[in-house]
Image: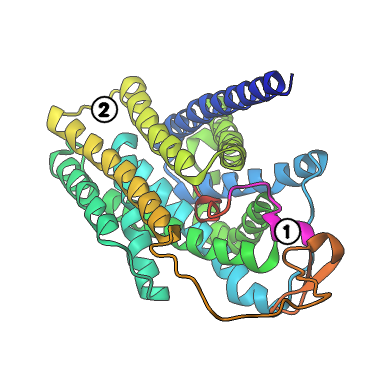
Amino acid sequence: MSNGIGKRTGSRHVLVVLTLCILWYIISSSNNVIGKMVLNEFPYPMTVTMIQLLSITLYSGPFFNLWKIRKYQELPRGYYLRLIIPLAFGKFLASVTSHISLWKVPVSYAHTVKATMPLFTVILSRLLFREKQPSLVYLSLIPIITGVGIATLTEISFDMMGLVSALISTMGFSLQNIFSKKVLKDTGIHHLRLLHLLGKLALFMFLPIWLYLDSFKVIQHPAITNLDYRVIALLFTDGVLNWLQNIIAFSVLSLVTPLTYAVASASKRIFVIAVSLFILGNPVTWLNCFGMGLAILGVLCYNRAKQISKEKSIIPTTTTKSSVSYTPLQNTIDPYYQGSLLTNHKSSNGYSRNNSLLANGSGMPNGSTTRLLFV
């Protein structure tokens, strides 16, 4: 009886993950195609970014409350200034440069360049935290660099601003992933609440800049003066799809291991490239396609190399018998292992968090927060 229940539960889990992945692929590819169509007719990347941030700000609060996503405690002002505000700045900068690259170069090439994210993650982790990687991880970066190089040299619609913008965007998302992991660990904030917080802060921080740089140009654009409902509808749809893409990506990540998520994310990139080539019809060569494929294959190799390195690091190499005697401590409660006996725990930052967060309270696999917010 229990075996039958377990099989049904496992089958249901697989079905849910597959359904979410299909939705994720469709929404992500639609978001990129619509984003490209919008920018072709309405060339204001900052305005498109602000609409996406506005969508995150407006939709997240009511829906997250409806879904009963746990709320976060107020964070100290010093922590806001030191980490949260820089993260919000990085979110806006990475999003704007991402839209600039989408505007200047084809979707397929922009996503190929974004495959360099593992390279930036390795370099930035080394520079910021002195973190060294095993040789296998470094070797896995070679096909990524080679593939992006081939795609760049053979890209028919190449644009230098598009390439530089895509690289800056990828570096920005890598930095956000690194520091968002620290924020999630320090504060215990739910990943979706952090997404909402960063989107809201980025919107308010850069609203004055948008008003100064873009607003007067936007209101004079024919699509606005003539009330072109097609462009307005595309802008609205782009904002909604971007918000949904993040929500579904987080849901997938909460149900699978980090390696499975990485493979699904790389597969999504292939799907986005294929759909954009089919719908938008930008010209490519076989050598260009080979470079794209090699870069995506390199991402899969990188994720596998990281998994192998992690497995090797936790496997004990030798077992020795110790002759040292010891006496167990009596009546000692370890709050990290007996969190149910502890209601609140003071963190090193000076504020408390409840014990549900000590068990990775977001319901996500351990080690997965590196890819949480920016997909």
- Toward the viewer: 310 or 70? 310
Q: Circle 2 sits in a helix, a strand or a loop, which is it? A: loop
Q: Which residues are magenta?
A: 355-365
Locate residue 87: give its quadrant: bottom right
Q: State yes or no: residue 184 in magenta.
A: no
Q: Which mark is residue 357?
A: 1
Locate residue 124: give its quadrant: bottom left
Name the amino acid type tagged 2.
Asn
Mark 1–mark 2 CB contact (< 8 Å): no
Q: Is the image coloured rainbow, by chain, by secondary structure, or in one colour?
A: rainbow
> What is the x, y in percent for residue 164?
29, 56
Question: In this rendering, which labeled residue sits more in front, label 1 or label 2?
Answer: 1
Asked if residue 129 can be seen in this view, the reply is yes
Q: Residue at x 48, y 29 (%)?
A: 25
Left or right: residue 4 compared with residue 304: right
> What is the x, y in percent for residue 172?
43, 60
Name the amino acid type tagged 1.
Leu
Q: CA distance from mark 1 to mark 2?
A: 47 Å
Query: Circle 1: is it few (<14), some (14-19), or many (20+) Cα within 10 Å?
Result: some
Q: Which mark is residue 282?
A: 2
- Toward the viewer: 373 or 45? 373
Left or right: residue 2 compared with residue 364: right
Q: Is residue 90 above or below residue 264?
A: below
Asked if residue 110 can be seen in this view, the reply is no
Q: Residue at x 13, y 39 (%)?
A: 154
